[in-house]
Image (tube, rainbow, N blue to C red):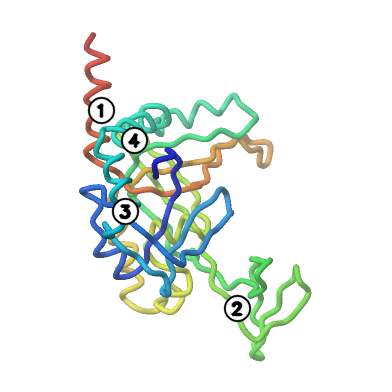
Amino acid sequence: IDTTGKEVTVTLWGEEAEKFDDSRQPVVAIKGARLSDFRGRSLSALFSSTIMVNPDIPEAFRLRAWGTASVLTKVVLTHFNRFLSTLYHIKSVNKQKYSNHISCVATVVYMRKENCLYQACPSADCNKKVIDQENGYYRCGKCNREYPNFKYRLLLSANLADFGDNQWVTCFQETAEVLLGRRAEELGQLRETAEFEEVFQKVNFTTHIFKNRVKLETYNDECRVKVTVMEVLPVNHREYSRRLISNIHKLAR
């Protein structure tokens, strides 16, 4: 978030993600990040990107002054109070035929890691699964072409829980990579190793903010709720605790 009040999600990878400390709400300057318009605008740091935390430049001082003037805290709290819901409210779409967007704080309790990776068409505009021709080539039925290579894609099912309910959700490539902290290609290389299992174990019982698209679908004359994770964000536990305390005070009146 900057002084305009607009916010954007930035994904860090590897060592930068491990050493990043957001506990004091630092000012961050990033040069050379990749811009994505997939399901809303977002940024992803590359290995070639330059990342500076609390840089010694006038723009950083101005942003810090704006943030420490309680403006940033008010913006964050307003965002939490307006948009956060619970998994229980997902059930309310049962009587709605249109999609809904529900954000909630939830904990990952289980992930179906079996078959979460698949070999996909290497074409930039196609993510369809390819068929191994067992002759060194992979065939894409959509493109009607054979390729000497493929790219790994993620399609992850996860079970989330909060204090009152649990829900199965689907994470596609972008959100699955954020949740697991690894790129699909990296996971593909680790597939037959113990480290692959460790990646999933580390995510179990971690808590995040999930922005979900909830839609009622009909399959074999049966209506069911489909939940797709659109974005995964870290929880600012200090602000979230303030929100919970505020809600308790409202209930006590």
Residue corresponding to mark 1: 244
Amino acid found under the numbered disc labelled 2: Phe
- Of tags 4 and 2, the one toward the viewer is 4
Q: Give how far apart the Cα atoms at labels 4 and 2 are.
A: 42 Å
- Dot 1 lies on which element? helix
Amino acid found under the numbered disc labelled 4: Val
- Of tags 3 and 4, the one toward the viewer is 3
Asked if labels 3 and 2 touch by Cβ distance under 8 angstroms, the answer is no
- Of tags 2 and 1, the one toward the viewer is 1
For marks 2 and 1, the one nearer the N-term is: 2
228 lies left or right of 166:
right
Query: Which residue is nearer to you in this view: 244 or 167?
Result: 244
Residue corresponding to mark 3: 58
Amino acid found under the numbered disc labelled 1: Leu
- Place residue 49 in its image quadrant: bottom left
Query: Which residue is nearer to you in this view: 235 or 146?
Result: 235
Q: Give how far apart the Cα atoms at labels 2 and 3 are.
A: 46 Å
Which residue corresponds to the image point at 52% horizontal and 42% vertical from the top-left?
A: 227
* Residues packed near mark 2 inside 10 Å, few (<14), some (14 to 19) or many (20 plus): many
For marks 4 and 2, the one nearer the N-term is: 4
For marks 2 and 3, the one nearer the N-term is: 3
Residue at the extreme bottom of the image, as rendered: 135
